[in-house]
Amino acid sequence: MVTVALGLCVSVACGSGSAAFAQADGHVSALVDSVPEAGEAAVTELRMRIFAERVQDVGGRLRLNLSAYVDGLVADRTGTGGRGAASDAVVRPGDLYAEVYTRRFDLRIGASRLVWGRLDELQPTDVVNPVDLTRFVLEGRTEARLPVALARARVFLPGSSTLEGVIVPAFRASRFDQLDEQTSPFNLAGPVIADRREPPVAWKNLQGGARFTSTAGRVDWGVSAYRGFRSFPVITAVGRATTPHGAGAVWAPASGSPDAPIALFPRFTMLGADFETVRGAWGMRGEVATFLDDPRAFEGGAGLDRRAGDYRVAANVLVSRDDQGTDATLIAAAERSFARETRTLRLFAAYDPVDATSFVRGIAAVSLRDDVWVEGSVGLFTGASAETLGQLSNRDFVYARLKVFF
């Protein structure tokens, strides 16, 4: 059934029959992961993905990007509230858009992912797309971004300047997990919330913003503004609201309160700025964002990275301030390839010195032959707090994945 579903998606995008598969690029993967301490018992999962993409230029002014994926799950989640074997499957569009382009202007309409900001993984101004928290933890932000329906126009100005405008007509929430979210070991919202108040499609609920980027000397810089909705829910009770820390807040009602929890997605207005430059072998980057009328009023940081041959190292510091005080996160990343890029090692680490929480993820990948890769990963969390990193305590994981490209 999964294969048939993907065939339908690709046939719509690229044509029909076997020719569609011959013209599409993509991969098939199977990932087995274990989260030993997620709940009352270890959670073990098999996650499968089929992904296909076709990029087609039509004439000299139109580009079609057509992609879709099918995700499947078979898991033992009895430790996190599941009953027996859990299973789920979703068929979703990926980047599915049409783009008209000229030398001075382009217009994109469809489902797409847009990257704003310059820091590693935790980018304060990267607010256009929601994310899948499970994929963020297992693989990183690039894989976690979820496409949203949008219209994006860019004007390319003299002096390497670009003015970008984005309109998002329909709200899409971030997910703790796209597969059987209720029993997922990375679900931070707790039990199912019956009263989930997602913004409906309406003129008053339009989201959108603008970004201007340019170059001054050897410094690339940008400023941005965006008005939208928080993509992770803020959990409240009637007459009492919890403070929205991180990706999601666990509902904690007042003593004796009979009120049922409500999931809200409040409005926010973001104003941001960023820069990037190179000095010798080192790259330097910075990014700040302020959120008007929001308890999380300020986030900003700076980073260094160095590329040399087959390796890259990076270090970032991110500071945030809200009505609860000031917090900081130290981030380090490293990547190294070997044997003509047939072996890779990737390391990511985040540490919060205020809450004494941390996360370390290592990934090793080996190419068995052309287009066939095997990956192994270990992720470790320490400490506990109300912030997102601290809420993921006891979610240590290990996984192995086979990925075949076509």
Image (cartoon, rainbow, N blue to C red):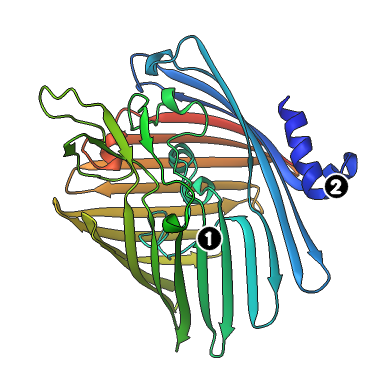
Q: Which mark is residue 15?
A: 2
Q: Nearer the viewer, residue 98 or 339?
A: 98
Per the image, label 1 sits on a secondary structure element best described as loop
Q: Position of residue 218 (x, y in %)?
A: 45, 85
Residue at image point 18% right, 55% down: 322
Residue at image point 64% right, 50% down: 339
User: In which image quadrant can residue 261 be found?
Assistant: top left
Residue at image point 37% right, 43% down: 232
Q: Which residue is mark 1?
A: 114
Query: Is residue 127 visible to the viewer in this orientation of the structure?
Result: no
Q: Nearer the viewer, residue 4 or 292?
A: 292
Three-letter code for the amino acid on which mark 2 is drawn: Gly
Tally the numbered discs.
2
First in sequence, mark 1 or 2: give its number. Answer: 2
Q: Nearer the viewer, residue 283 or 11?
A: 11
Query: Is residue 278 visible to the viewer in this orientation of the structure?
Result: yes
Q: Pick the quarter of the image with the C terminus.
A: top right
| Side of 98 relative to 217 (left or right) | right
